[in-house]
Each structure stands twice: as structure tokens, then as C-alpha cells.
Amino acid sequence: MQPDPANDTGKHGAPLTPSGVGTRRRLGVMGGTFDPIHNGHLVAASEVADKFFLDEVIFVPTGRPWQKEGRDVSAAEDRYLMTVIATASNPRFSVSRVDIDRAGITRTVDTLRDFRERHPHDELFFITGADALANILSWQKWEEIFDLAKFVGVSRPGYDLHTEHLDHHLDGYPDDTVTLIEIPALAISSSDCRARARDGRPVWYLVPDGVVQYIAKRSLYM
């Protein structure tokens, strides 16, 4: 498991090189409920794109997230549109409907299978919260997902993450299969944004301006 690639070195200490040198693209896949998407998500995606020389970061709102069973989740179309609004100004960002349009519960292995089928020659980096990554052994077909993409776990500074239990499961995989990095803006959380909106408190500067307006227009989280 790799630490933050602060020195911009890849496997075996070789310098990372920006995509474009060859024909293989480097794509970030950022899955999430995005209920709502907030500035922490955007900063995390931007930081990962910079550190890993990604050509594009594709945001993938979940359809029916299996981890959120039993909790009310906003309609998929609302979450998708908020993500489109939030990412529209960054030419490196895009949004995919692959999970929303797939029937049934959303699972990471299905997301990555779809992306691998659509991008057979590209290098995939799945971006997720480091806390979720710590529980990856509970994900369906977790053994397969490490063959489909590299994983980047993002966390807020000072977050005490224990991932030693993953190490022996990664034997035989490249050193950079899983990388952890700290993102200061991840102190923002979607649950806090929902609570603030529900209580009539401002969410300005926590989520993009267009998302603030969308939440108000749709009366979300009330």
C-alpha cells in the first residue's frame, strides 16, 4: 500500500509521467452518493487528478447504494443533476450515468466492469473515501476489483486509518494498487450539508453555488 505520492514517484520509485506520452489514458472514476456533492469532493478529485496525472475524472453518482439501505436517499436524477452542475466549470471533470441507469443495487464491481468494458486500454483509478476503503473486504467480489482498477483513498488530515488488514490481501499486486492521500477540504461532509439545509442554515461555500440554488429550488432535505 502506497503513502501519499508527494514526490510524484510510481512503482519502484520511477517518476510518474503525464498522460499523453503514450496512447493510454489515465481516468479517475469517483463514485459516490453525492447527496449532495460538496466542495470537498471537488477538491479531492482535483488533487488526485494533479498527483496522478489523470486526463479526466469521471464522477459516478450511485443508483441504489447498497451501503445506504435503510436511509432515505435523494432521487437519483436530483443527485445526478447536482453533480453535473457542480462539475460543469472544470474541463477535466465529467459525469456518468452508468450506475443510475443500471437496474438494481449499485456495487463497485459492476461500476468498474462497465468502465473496463468501455475503456479496455485505459488505466483506471477508483477514487473513494479512505474510511470506505478500510472496509473494502466487505464489498461484493472485492478480489476482482483490484484487477479492474487502482484505488486511491482520500481522507481528511489527522484521520487515523488502519489498513494493515489489507496488506496480505494485496500480496502479488503492484505496490501502487492502493494509495492513501490527505485532502484538507474533506472536513466537509454530505451529512452535515443535509442537516444544515434541513435546519434552514446556510450551505454556501460548502457546496458549489449552483448546487445551493438547486437544493433550494427542489426543497431537498427539508
Image (tube, rainbow, N blue to C red):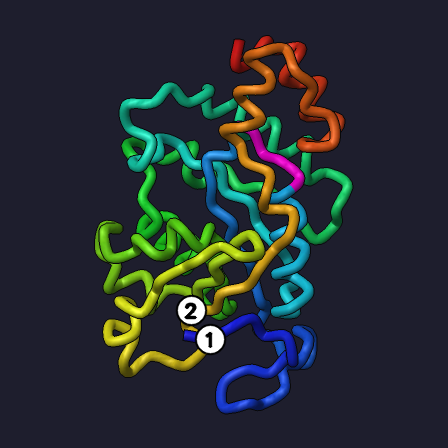
Q: Whole-percent x and y of residue 95? A: 58, 41
Q: Whole-percent x and y of residue 179? A: 47, 69
Q: Whole-percent x and y of residue 76? A: 46, 25
Three-letter amino acid code at disc 1?
A: Gln
Nearest the eye: 60 or 67 = 67
Nearest the eye: 3 or 139 = 3
Q: Is residue 118 visible?
A: no
Q: Could you tell me how far apart the alpha carbons at marks 2 and 1 are, in whole angstroms?
A: 6 Å
- For residue 178, the mark is 2
> Within 10 Å of the Cα at label 2, are there few (<14), some (14-19), or many (20+) other Cα atoms?
many
Q: Is residue 12 visible?
A: yes
53 to 47, vertically: above or below: below
In the visual, does 17 lie left or right of 78?
right
Q: Earlier in the sequence, mark 2 or mark 1?
A: 1
Determine the secondary structure under disc 1: loop
Three-letter amino acid code at disc 2?
A: Val
Nearest the eye: 81 or 188 = 188
Image quadrant holding the N terminus, namely bottom left
- Residue at figure coordinates x 35%, y 34% from the top left: 65
- Residue at figure coordinates x 48%, y 37% from the top left: 61
28 in magenta? no
- For residue 122, the mark is none
154 to 98, vertically: above or below: below
Q: Whole-percent x and y of residue 59? A: 55, 45
Provide the residue span drawn in magenta: 35-39
The residue that label 1 is drawn on is 2
- Residue at figure coordinates x 32%, y 48% from the top left: 110
